[in-house]
Amino acid sequence: MRSPFWLVPLFAVTCFLAACGGGGGPETTTNPTPKTAVCELQLKYANGSNGGYTINNSLTESVPRQFNTCSIQTIKSASVSLCLDHPQISELTAQLRMPNNITVALDLQNVQPGETCLISGKSFSIPLPINGLPLPTSADRNWTVGVTDTNSVSNQPGYMVGWSMKVEGLE
């Protein structure tokens, strides 16, 4: 019969190996997967209060808006939604003025109207090209949209009721 004292050294060696981690290779660290984030300017009246702006044959711009704290570092997609009340959308052109004062044309002619928005109007969601799009936390941070009625002869009044913007990306 064996002595039970041989278990003590075996137990000590087992504890030592467990404390060492048991592996002999270099430690590897994995980079955490970046988290996705969404930053939005919620749908709001173009003039900042109730109503909107009458669309003329000169550029009608909204009041400037700014994103609150936004942690996006890499933009994956972005879009602007306009709430317009006009009988002939085909007569309108639109643009987004970014914080760097560069404008991007918003193609109203190739998007389908969505649901009714705010008090009156239809929503039009336009995807934005992400190349050259500044991060929502840009230094100046002022974003505006503008609409122009290209038919100066028509007496059909129209309104830029409101707008929103959505940016999706990685933190």
Image (cartoon, rainbow, N blue to C red):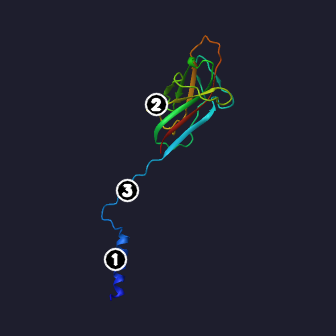
- x then y, percent, for residue 127: 50, 30
Horizontal placement of 122 versus 9: left or right?
right
Q: Residues within 10 Å of mark 1 (few under 14, many from 20)?
A: few
The amino acid marked with disc number 2 is: Pro
- Per the image, the residue denoted by label 2 is 129
The amino acid marked with disc number 1 is: Val
- x then y, percent, for residue 40: 56, 38
- Which of discs 1 and 3 lies nearer the camera? The answer is 1
What is the quadrant of residue 53 in the picture? top right
- Identify the secondary structure beneath mark 3: loop
Tell me if residue 156 comes above or below residue 79 in the rendering: above
Horizontal placement of 88 versus 171: left or right?
right
Verify CB contact (< 8 Å) between mark 1 and mark 2. no
- Identify the secondary structure beneath mark 2: loop
Tell me if residue 35 comes above or below residue 128 in the rendering: below
- Residue at the spot 56% in from the left edge and 15% down from the top edge: 150
Distance between mark 1 and mark 2 Cα atoms: 63 Å
- Residue at the spot 36% in from the left edge and 86% down from the top edge: 4
- x then y, percent, for residue 105: 50, 24
- Residue at the spot 65% in from the left edge and 15% down from the top edge: 156
- Which of discs 1 and 2 lies nearer the camera? The answer is 1
- Per the image, the residue denoted by label 1 is 13
- Identify the secondary structure beneath mark 1: helix
What is the quadrant of residue 125 in the picture? top right
- x then y, percent, for residue 61: 59, 25
- Per the image, the residue denoted by label 3 is 29
